[in-house]
Amino acid sequence: MFDVPINYQRWSLIRITTKRYEQCGVRQSKAGLQDFRMKYQAQSARSNAGHQCTRPSPVEMLRAQVCANGELSFLMEAHDGLSATIAERSGFKGLWASGLSIACSLGYRDANEASWTQLVDAVERIVDSSQLPVLVDGDGGFGNFNNARLLARKLLQRGAAGVALEDSCFPKMNSFVGDRHPIADIDEFSGRLRAVKDTVANDLVLVARIEALIAGYEMDEALLRAHAYADAGADAILIHSRRSTADEILSFARAWQNRLPVVIVPTKYYRTPISVYRKARISTVIWANHSMRAAIAAMRQVCSRIIAEENTASVEPNIATLDEVFALLKYDELARAEALYLRPDTEPRR
Ligand code: SPV
Ligand code: MG
């Protein structure tokens, strides 16, 4: 059987899919969502009574990592079920569903070419493939406040633990492409955040991402935005920088004084030692795209060898064995389930 604690099984069952809503007779309005949540919480509280060991929900797990203001936490990029599984097995405690990496795995550019439904579907595979909380890169929310709150509601239904929204304009462009990006009006973006907060309350961790430094504005603008986004209900601030040193994000952290936890993405300033972030009381580091980039390098290498050698003998020692593939995807669990659930006279597969 699955090696899953009882409360997590219950949470997964209640992971709010559209079908579940229908089964529970709850409409997908805001009132319906709240009604469903209350029912779930009451049901959960009742059935938890008597269980000594309770597993926190995904949002509680993510909140403890991002918003605890204590230990530095790390979120590892995932772009599909496999990368989520591998990150979990490697020991990560939380995942970043990267917009760049998900788009890339679908063959799209990180410019809102993938639709919000494609993002939500990818997130569902990521969520289902591990027990880790998933912070989803929601870009700018795919439009105005209305699109942003719809996205947040759908992510909640698919089991995400949090969403990061950036103050970009639709369609966005990846932060590291080009020099200057238009950024959203502060009040308009604050409205997107408020709409999301009013829709999902504390059931998703809401991270507000500031693109001001990326877009070439001064630190004052970044701080002004951070305060506005905190007032709008964000749970944490992601400050993004394109510099190759951490100076910019460190001066932000000094001036900000942890009014809300600070999340960073050291893709460009990767040489900075982690101790620097601990000292600056950064809450969370996101390794935003490294599995996707590793996959590109590995696939490119194997393809060029096979086409050149017209043989796979030389690549075999450097690629995962089939047994590793079967172990990652828990084929053994299926064999045990077959023994339990198929006709009793059916032999389990070996
Ligand atoms: C992502 O992973 O999609 C991000 C981080 O948003 S970055 O690409 O660094 O902007
Ligand atoms: Mg992104």
Image (cartoon, rainbow, N blue to C red):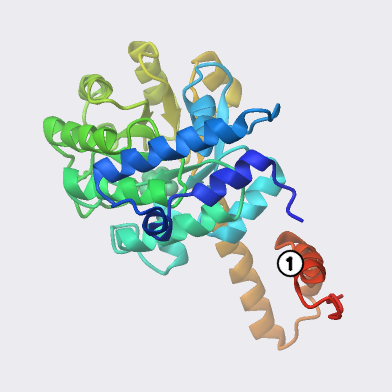
Please say if 349 is above or below 110. below
Give how far across and how far down residue 7 sits, in percent.
62, 39
Neighbor class of circle 1 (other Cα within 10 Å; few <14, some 14-19, many 20+) is: few
Pick the front one: 298 or 54: 54
Please say if 257 is above or below 178. above
Quadrant in which the C terminus appears: bottom right
Relative to 138, is 125 on the left or the right? right
Name which residue lies at 47% across and 41% down.
Answer: 267
Pick the front one: 293 or 261: 261
Quarter-of-image position of residue 347? bottom right
Pick the front one: 205 or 309: 205
Give how far across and how far down residue 66 sits, in percent.
49, 27
Name which residue lies at 70% across and 26% down.
Answer: 52
Quadrant in which the N terminus appears: bottom right
Please say if 72 is above or below 129. above
Q: Amino acid at mark 1?
A: Val
Give how far across and how far down residue 95 sits, in percent.
54, 43
Location of mark 1 (residue): 325
Name which residue lies at 31% across and 58% down.
Answer: 116
Give how far across and how far down residue 168 sits, in percent.
23, 43
Q: What secondary structure is found at the residue carrying circle 1?
A: helix
Quarter-of-image position of residue 165? top left
Ligand 1 contact, mark 1 (Cβ < 8 Å): no
